[in-house]
Amino acid sequence: MFKKCEFCGKDYETHNSKSKYCSKSCSNKGRNHKNVKCNCDVCGKEIEIVYSRYLKNKHNYCSVECQAKGKKLFYTGKNNPLYDKVIVKCEICNKEIEINKYRYKHQKHFYCSYSCKYKGNTIYQSGENNPFYGKQHSDETKDKISQANKGNEVWNKGYKVPWKTDEEREKDRSLYGDKYKEWRNEVFARDNYTCQCCGSSKGGNLNAHHLNGYAWCKDERLNVDNGITLCKECHRLFHSIYGKGNNTIEQFIEFMKNIRSA
């Protein structure tokens, strides 16, 4: 098959029906020949770009710097494809907030701040509402998680909880030191290292539970009388029923009555 080169006009033989040029040199020159001249949409500098890009692009730039400025200029506010927003109310404090339609479509709950999000999670993600409720990782999965995290720093090291004051953070740091360990060991020793709910005494399977919640009853955090020994299963069962954060001794008494009558 003979064709005519689109760049130099020379006749050449080819087996490719889509061929346009007689040689690689003509191919390179021919493609560059289709470049078009236009102006940078930010600084106005004259540039030369491939014709296909000229047709496809809405805006053209001479450099990465101008591209960054152009995005701020042409794609912010109402010009942003995601600008279309919906007004919803925070599910904790009822404050009105603006979110984009994508979030409105895919999220179940909406919050105005991290503080409200934390409170919302204790309501909507605890007990039977938790997607992992009643489930457990297999031993194989636990081993994989353990191996993956070996040698890694704790993800939230140095993270500041936004709804706590510096004084509260400092107090928590001291409580999570030797004093907290002493409190836990004293609770275990008093209860003879035995779960006070089911009687389990398996080593490494015990938790020291605060009868009046650690979060709100700050004066009783290190009071041994405010602690009781539970195995991990009973501890998890209690919090799956009553949630976390605002627990009371009355809840625990009710929990024990229900367990014994079951």
Image (cartoon, rainbow, N blue to C red):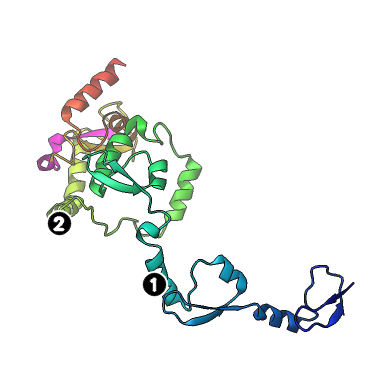
Callout 2 secondary element: helix
Residue nearest the observer in this picture, 62 or 125: 62
Q: What residue is pinned by disc 2?
A: 166
Span highlighted in magenta in the image: 218-230
Q: What residue is pinned by disc 1?
A: 69
Residue nearest the observer in this picture, 161 or 4: 4
Count of picture labels: 2
Mark 1: give few (<14), some (14-19) or many (20+) Cα within 10 Å: some
Callout 1 secondary element: helix
**CA distance separating discs 1 and 2:** 39 Å
Could you say which disc has been placed on residue 249 in the image?
none
Disc 2 residue type (three-letter)? Asp
Query: In this rendering, would 193 be left or right of 149?
Result: left
Question: What percent of the width, then of the height, locates residue 53?
Answer: 58, 70
Question: What percent of the width, then of the height, locates residue 262?
Answer: 32, 16
Residue at point 12%, 42% (across, down): 218
User: Looking at the image, is mark 1 or mark 2 earlier in the sequence?
Assistant: 1
Residue 103 lies in magenta, yes or no? no
Disc 1 residue type (three-letter)? Lys
For the N terminus, which image quadrant?
bottom right
